[in-house]
Amino acid sequence: MNFMNILLQAAGQQSSIPMWIMLGAMFLIIYFFMIRPQNKKQKEIANFRKTLEVNQEVITAGGIHGVIKNIDGTMVELQIANNVKIMIDVSSIFAKPTVQEKKK
């Protein structure tokens, strides 16, 4: 009788292998569609910030367009209009204007 109970219990249990395969597939999908592109974008922005130069046009994270006039460590002097200069942190510089943005 004990042997018969063991066989019936074993037949009722399902394998957990398909569940692990599905979890692994979901992690891969999330990695390739969300995590990897975000890391790539962050590396591009970090490389752009390292290569900042004087008289380069940039856009801040707040949307301010300007030209770099001086770089002092982690601070940048940005000219946004004639005789109007502001000091901002390098980490707030987000991108440089594209060709379409310059036409506007």
Image (cartoon, grey):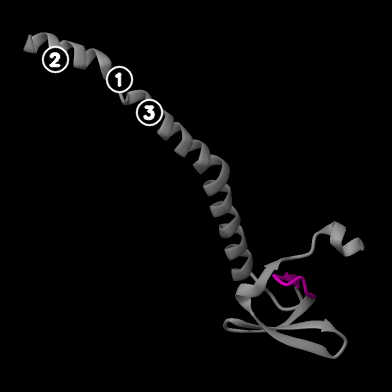
Q: CA distance from mark 3 to mark 2?
A: 24 Å
Residue type of the residue flagged with mark 2: Ile
Earlier along the polypeptide chain: callout 3 or callout 1?
A: 1
Residue at 88 percent of width and 87 percent of height? 82
Does the magenta segment cover residue 76?
no
**Where in the figure is residue 60, as x and y percent of width and height?**
72, 72
Q: SS at mark 3? A: helix
Above or below: residue 1 compared with residue 15:
above
Secondary structure of residue under mark 2 = helix
Which image quarter holds the C terminus? bottom right
Residue at 62%, 76% (x, y): give it.
90
Q: Nearer the viewer, residue 20 or 1?
A: 1
- Given contact means CB atoms under 8 Å apart, are the residues at marks 3 and 1 in contact? no
Mark 2 in CB contact with mark 1 (< 8 angstroms):
no
Q: Is residue 53 left or right of residue 37?
A: right
- Within 10 angstroms of label 2, few (less than 14), some, or many (20 or more) residues? few
The magenta span reads 57-65
CA distance separating discs 3 and 1 = 10 Å
What is the three-letter code of the residue carrying label 1? Gln
Query: Hey, what amino acid is under mark 3?
Result: Met
Q: Which mark is residue 14?
A: 1
Number of on-image labels: 3
| Label 1 neighbour load within 10 Å: few <14, some 14-19, many 20+ | few
Residue depicted at x 72% and y 78%: 54
Q: Quadrant of residue 86?
A: bottom right
Which residue in the structure is indicated by mark 3?
A: 19
Residue 6 is labelled as 2
